[in-house]
């Protein structure tokens, strides 16, 4: 399974890469939403994990673009953000996010959520 991690913080990208690779995932990454949209279209990952607060294009804009494009709408997107207010979480789901996890996070819980998202997407 391929996971696309979109985050402008290299420490978060490295943490996710190490944890997911230890579980057998292939991990690719992008530093902002615009690059992330391009990578989803080119690489067709099994799932996307995206931060919200990023330069150029934020994670909410990314979700909106991916979910409104028929060629990428089926790719599960999990938002991973420090924005923990209920309004932020609701906005993410309204735009089409498949799940939302707040930072700090438990890597094992995140891997479980990603595995469940991919399994659900494959059943569709």
Image (cartoon, helix red, strand yellow):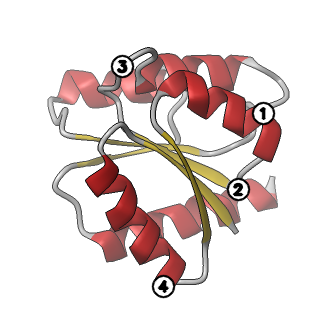
User: Is 94 left or right of 15, judged from the image as shown?
Assistant: right
Residue neighbourhood size for the residue with mark 2, other residues' Cα within 10 Å, grouped as few (<14), some (14–19), many (≥20)? many
Vertical side of 117 occupied by 99: above or below:
above
Kindly identify which residue carries mark 3.
Answer: 55
Vertical side of 10 occupied by 25: above or below:
below
N-terminal-most mark, 1 or 2: 1
Report the Cα–Cα distance between label 1 and label 3.
20 Å
User: Which mark is nearer the camera, 2 or 4?
Assistant: 4
Question: In the rendering, at what x and y percent does residue 76 appear?
Answer: 62, 45
Residue neighbourhood size for the residue with mark 3, other residues' Cα within 10 Å, grouped as few (<14), some (14–19), many (≥20)? few
User: Is 72 left or right of 48, judged from the image as shown?
Assistant: right
Is the Cβ of the residue at disc 1 closer than 8 Å to that at disc 3?
A: no
User: Is 83 left or right of 54, judged from the image as shown?
Assistant: left
Report the Cα–Cα distance between label 2 and label 4.
17 Å
Question: In the rendering, at what x and y percent does residue 12 appear?
Answer: 30, 54
Is the Cβ of the residue at disc 1 closer than 8 Å to that at disc 4?
A: no
The one of 53 and 120 positioned closer to us in this rendering: 53
Report the Cα–Cα distance between label 1 and label 2.
12 Å
Residue neighbourhood size for the residue with mark 1, other residues' Cα within 10 Å, grouped as few (<14), some (14–19), many (≥20)? few
User: Which mark is nearer the camera, 1 or 2?
Assistant: 1
Position of the N terminus, as image quadrant, is: bottom right
Kindly identify which residue carries mark 4.
Answer: 22
N-terminal-most mark, 3 or 2: 2
Tag 4 secondary structure? helix
Question: In the image, which disc is placed on residue 46?
Answer: 2
Kindly identify which residue carries mark 1.
Answer: 41
Tag 2 secondary structure? loop
N-terminal-most mark, 1 or 3: 1
Question: In the rendering, at what x and y percent does residue 7 appear?
Answer: 39, 40
């Amino acid at each position: 399974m391929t996971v696309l991690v979109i985050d402008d913080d290299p420490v978060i990208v490295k943490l996710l890469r190490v944890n997911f690779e230890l579980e057998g995932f292939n991990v690719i990454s992008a530093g902002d939403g615009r690059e992330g949209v391009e990578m989803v279209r080119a690489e067709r990952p099994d799932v996307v994990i995206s931060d919200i607060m990023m330069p150029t294009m934020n994670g909410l804009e990314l979700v909106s673009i991916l979910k409104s494009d028929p060629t990428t709408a089926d790719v599960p997107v999990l938002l991973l953000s420090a924005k923990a207010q209920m309004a932020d979480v609701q906005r993410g789901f309204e735009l089409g996010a498949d799940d939302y996890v707040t930072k700090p996070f438990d890597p094992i819980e995140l891997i479980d959520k990603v595995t469940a998202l991919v399994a659900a997407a494959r059943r569709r």
